[in-house]
Image: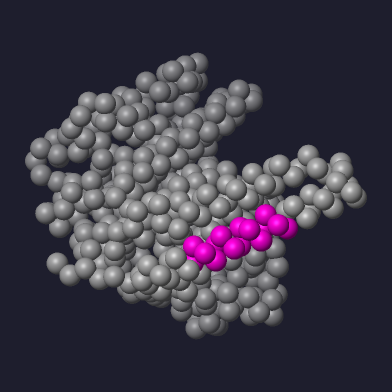
């Protein structure tokens, strides 16, 4: 099988290393001069100096260990996974960290290693999408866009660029599949536990039965659905009992978290994903799947009894009521009907400007049935129309190319039967998840906030990286590499 190498000779890497040392020495010299100045002019700030030095040292260490750096980026997403008004200090720090990481990653690949970063339709489409989103900022301002909304939406779109280091990590690092799958399950479990805690707090504050019946944990429904599906796929193929136990706990946590969101769209999406698994699995795994569905149902009930013993009957009543309303949601659910009106309003604006769009952060007006007032916002629940409204046909086309390309790469990797099972399952799980996510994108926008774009970048990056790994299209680097 051909083995393509896109890196510079070792002399270039050595030159990069020397430049890095010179930079480190320059920083050290500047730090010493700053220390002398602070000792003379502002001795009260000296206590912060060791923290600064430790931060510089930690940053340099992370730059030399890319797998660890990427792991921290992915795990740190937990800090910004909840939706709070305004920009929190943790969001600012995390945003600065991952944007700096992405800038360094692209500069090192393009100018030092000379890697072919844009070598597939999906990667080219994503790069052009971010370039186009950046170029539309002046248009956004001219169209009356809110500068804070523009910045927030651009940062969310930039999160999609994590696709590139995730793809490279899967292709080049031997242990990347184990690391990322474990990390994904841990992230989902932590978010599920946080939702369980917030849900329990809401029950404690409830004063009437209807508040318990309609109570829900509304955050991270797409992430919990996706990780539930991924966990189920790996659980079905686990052979050792301790792996089965860990995967079962992770699956149950995420599945219970998904149930408590009371998001009917993602309930249906999960069931659709389970249905697709029957197409790909043999009889033995289909039997396991049926058994795990039953175990998951009883396990969710056991979790409910443990955590919400005194409220369990009301909670079950609420879930049954929510499930029974699936058939009539389009005609009776005021929230869903409201989104249809919102979609109609946005579509009328798109028809007036279908090619280049209006830009990010540009508000539109429509009468909100849930509030009985006119709403002014740039958020559109329909993910496809949201991209079309903001970034025009170029933005919508680019994301669809990336989406379809990633699904194809994931399924292709799974069908490569002479490859390791873990790698094949990474391809299948991401392809299945990306396929079923096309449904809730009609009413739950995955491209407006950080959690949706993070999930999409993660899934698409794993699918593409798994495909690259199996095709040996990029050289394998050790985790000791400078970048």
* Residue extent of the magenta highlight: 16-30
Q: Residue furthest right?
A: 41
For residue 206, side relative to residue 271 (left or right): right
In the image, 66: left or right of 272? right
Location of residue 256 in the rendering, given as x and y in whole percent from the top left corner: 41, 32
Residue 370 forms part of the magenta stretch: no
Q: Main secondary structure of the magenta part?
A: helix
Q: Which residue is located at x 36 percent, y 33 percent? A: 250
The relative height of residue 145 versus residue 259 in the rendered view (above or below) is below
The residue lying toward the viewer, choosing from 305 and 324, is 305
Q: Is residue 84 visible?
A: no
Q: Which quadrant does the N terminus fall into?
A: bottom left
The residue at 54%/28% (across/down) is 197
Asked where in the image residue 359 lies, by quadrant, the reply is bottom right
In the image, residue 280 sits, relative to residue 379, either above or below, namely above
- The residue shown at (31%, 33%) is 247
Query: Which corner quadrant holds the C terminus?
Result: bottom left
Figure check: 212 above or below 368: above
């Amino acid at each position: 099988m051909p083995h393509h190498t896109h890196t510079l000779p070792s002399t270039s890497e050595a030159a990069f290393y020397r430049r890095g040392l010179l930079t480190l020495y320059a920083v050290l010299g500047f730090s010493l001069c700053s220390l002398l100045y602070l000792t003379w002019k502002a001795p009260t700030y000296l206590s912060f100096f060791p923290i600064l030095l430790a931060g510089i040292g930690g940053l340099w260490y992370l730059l030399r260990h890319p797998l660890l750096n990427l792991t921290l980026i992915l795990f740190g997403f937990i800090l910004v996974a909840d939706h709070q008004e305004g920009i929190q200090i943790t969001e600012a720090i995390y945003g600065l960290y991952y944007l700096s990481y992405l800038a360094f990653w692209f500069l090192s690949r393009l100018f030092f290693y000379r890697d072919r970063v844009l070598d597939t339709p999906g990667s080219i489409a994503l790069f052009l999408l971010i370039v186009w989103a950046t170029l539309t900022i002046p248009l956004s301002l001219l169209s009356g866009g809110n500068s804070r909304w523009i910045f927030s939406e651009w940062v969310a779109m930039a999160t999609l660029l994590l696709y590139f280091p995730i793809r490279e990590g899967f292709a080049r690092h031997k242990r990347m599949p184990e690391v990322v799958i474990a990390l994904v399950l841990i992230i989902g479990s932590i978010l599920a536990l946080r939702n369980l805690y917030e849900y329990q707090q809401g029950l404690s504050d409830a004063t009437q039965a209807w508040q318990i019946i309609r109570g829900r944990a509304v955050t991270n429904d797409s992430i919990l659905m996706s990780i539930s599906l991924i966990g189920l796929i790996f659980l079905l193929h686990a052979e050792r009992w301790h792996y089965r136990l860990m995967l079962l706990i992770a699956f149950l946590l995420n599945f219970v978290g998904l149930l408590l969101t009371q998001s009917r769209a993602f309930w249906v999406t999960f069931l659709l994903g389970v249905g697709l698994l029957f197409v790909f699995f043999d009889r033995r795994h289909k039997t396991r799947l049926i058994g795990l569905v039953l175990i998951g149902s009883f396990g969710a009930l056991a979790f409910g009894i443990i955590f919400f013993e005194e409220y369990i009957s009301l909670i079950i009543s609420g879930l049954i009521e929510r499930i029974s309303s699936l058939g009539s949601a389009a005609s009776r659910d005021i929230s869903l009907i409201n989104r249809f009106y919102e979609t109609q309003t946005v579509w009328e604006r798109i028809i007036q400007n279908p090619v280049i769009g209006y830009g990010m952060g540009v508000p539109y007006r429509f009468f909100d049935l849930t509030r009985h007032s006119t709403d002014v916002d740039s958020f559109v629940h329909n993910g496809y129309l949201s991209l079309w409204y903001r970034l025009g046909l170029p933005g919508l086309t680019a994301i669809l190319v990336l989406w379809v390309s990633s699904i194809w790469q994931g399924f292709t990797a799974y069908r490569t039967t002479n490859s390791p099972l873990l790698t094949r399952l990474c391809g299948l799980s991401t392809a299945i998840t990306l396929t079923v996510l096309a449904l809730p994108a009609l009413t739950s926008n995955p491209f407006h906030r950080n959690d949706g774009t993070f999930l999409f970048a993660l899934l698409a990056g794993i699918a593409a990286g798994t495909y690259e790994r199996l095709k040996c299209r990029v050289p394998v680097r050790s985790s000791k590499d400078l970048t």
